[in-house]
Amino acid sequence: MYRQGMLIWERPEPPNRPVPAPLSRDRIVQAAIQLADADGLDAVSLRKVATALDVRPMRLYGYIASKEELLDLMVDAAHAGIRPVGDGWREVLRSLAEATRHAAHEHEWLADLLGGRPQLGPHALASGETVVAALGDVDLDDVMPMVAAVNAYVIGAVRREIAERRAERATGMDERRWQASLGPYLERTFATGRFPALATVVRDAAHLDADHTFRIGLDFLLDGIEARIARS
């Protein structure tokens, strides 16, 4: 039963009792993740999760009070795979970025739920503890802005990448075919001479894949952080 004022992380589960279909928060969350992985967040509701688990929807309310709590638990379950490692702040922040990106690629719905207020589930807190501990030599006032900058970069990058995946599925055109379809239009537009800087970049710059683009952008960010630390 829901206890007023207790967050989902603190609220105990109902006691086990003999029933035809055993239930737990973990089973509920895993069923919800499977639905979201297959069909996105629109496929997740307490009723649909109950159907997947072959139980009545009211049974779920003994474990989870709302869909919002279910989404919080799903995000925290995804954070179980985000375990930054490395020696020194730069390696740990890079590891955080790479692990978060990997989790979002594995669970596309995660990209829609990252950001906003901090995640306070046990797995998210464990990840945050690892990162902040690695920043022990950094000025205390710089710690959270540094982490926020990396998280903001990752969230923006993965949302763009996931949007590209979704567009590819919706149109049936991968990035190369999409670019080829727009090629004649861009050639006509650039031939007007109105966009010389863009024309030079599009024609002459290296066209990197998503992995290289992500890592180079992350290097730009980490280089800037390193330069600021050196100045202070």
Image: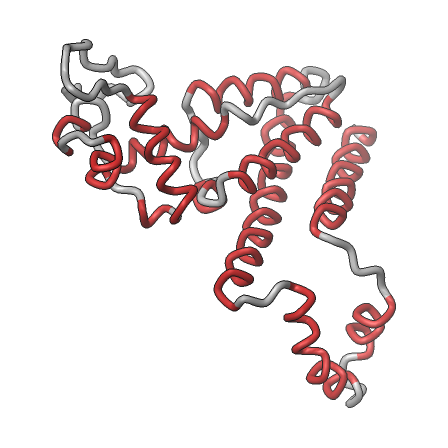
Residue 30 in the image: state x and y as whole percent: 37, 29
Q: Which of the pair 203/135 is nearer the observer?
A: 203
Would you say 162 lies left or right of 90 here?
left
* Residue shown at 77% from the left, 34% from the top: 228
* Residue shown at 65% from the left, 64% from the top: 175
Would you say 108 lies left or right of 59 here?
right
Q: Quadrant of residue 35?
A: top left
Q: Quadrant of the N terminus?
A: top left
Residue 217 in the image: state x and y as whole percent: 74, 46
Residue 55 in the image: state x and y as whole percent: 17, 29
For the question of whether residue 27 can be seen, the reply is yes
Q: Which of the pair 120/38 is nearer the observer?
A: 38
Q: Which of the pair 56/210 is nearer the observer?
A: 56
Q: Quadrant of residue 181?
A: bottom right
Would you say 1 lies left or right of 231 here?
left
Question: Compared to 42, does 145 lie above or below?
Answer: above
Q: Quadrant of residue 2?
A: top left
* Residue shown at 78% from the left, 55% from the top: 208
Q: Quadrant of the C terminus?
A: top right
Residue 40 in the image: state x and y as whole percent: 39, 48
